[in-house]
Image (cartoon, grey):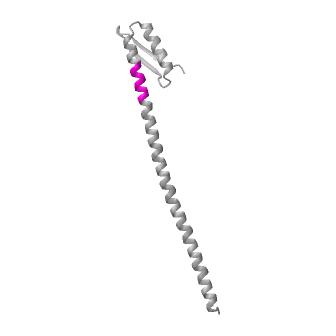
Amino acid sequence: MLSLYEKIKIRLIILFLLAALSFIGLFFIINYQLVSERAVKRADSRFELIQKNVGYFFKDIERSALTLKDSLYLLKNTEEIQRAVILKMEMMPFLDSVGLVLDDNKYYLFSRRA
């Protein structure tokens, strides 16, 4: 038969183990919440950054297309127009092809070679 001291000692050990397990469990739950919140914030900030970069990319394309259009509007000679389009395509790596209909109703298609 166990003495009163041993019963109290066993109960204290059990209480200590339960407290330690609940502390560890609470630590993992809080850590999981913080990590998941951080991951969501990080994903949101990455998405915003990607969205801004895509917006800048398309604005750059639009700006380059407008400068190409303006520069071609000033040129009259067909050879000058062809040279200007080829030079502009070399400056814009994202531009693969340009189609033009000139005043004499001729259609020109400039394509980048692979």
Residue 18 quadrant: bottom right
The location of residue 16, given as percent across then percent down, is 59, 77
Q: Nearer the viewer, residue 59 or 79?
A: 59
In which quadrant will I find the C terminus?
top right
At x 52% / y 59%, what residue is drawn? 32
Range shown magenta: 59-67
Q: Is residue 3 above or below residue 33?
A: below
At x 43% / y 39%, what residue is drawn? 51
Q: Is residue 2 above or below residue 34?
A: below
The location of residue 98, given as percent across then percent down, is 43, 19
At x 48% / y 15%, what residue is drawn? 86
At x 38% / y 18%, what residue is drawn? 69
Q: Is residue 27 above or below residue 7?
A: above
In which quadrant will I find the N terminus?
bottom right
Q: Is residue 18 left or right of residue 107?
A: right
Q: In the rendered structure, does residue 32 fall within the stretch colored magenta?
A: no
Q: Nearer the viewer, residue 70 or 96?
A: 70
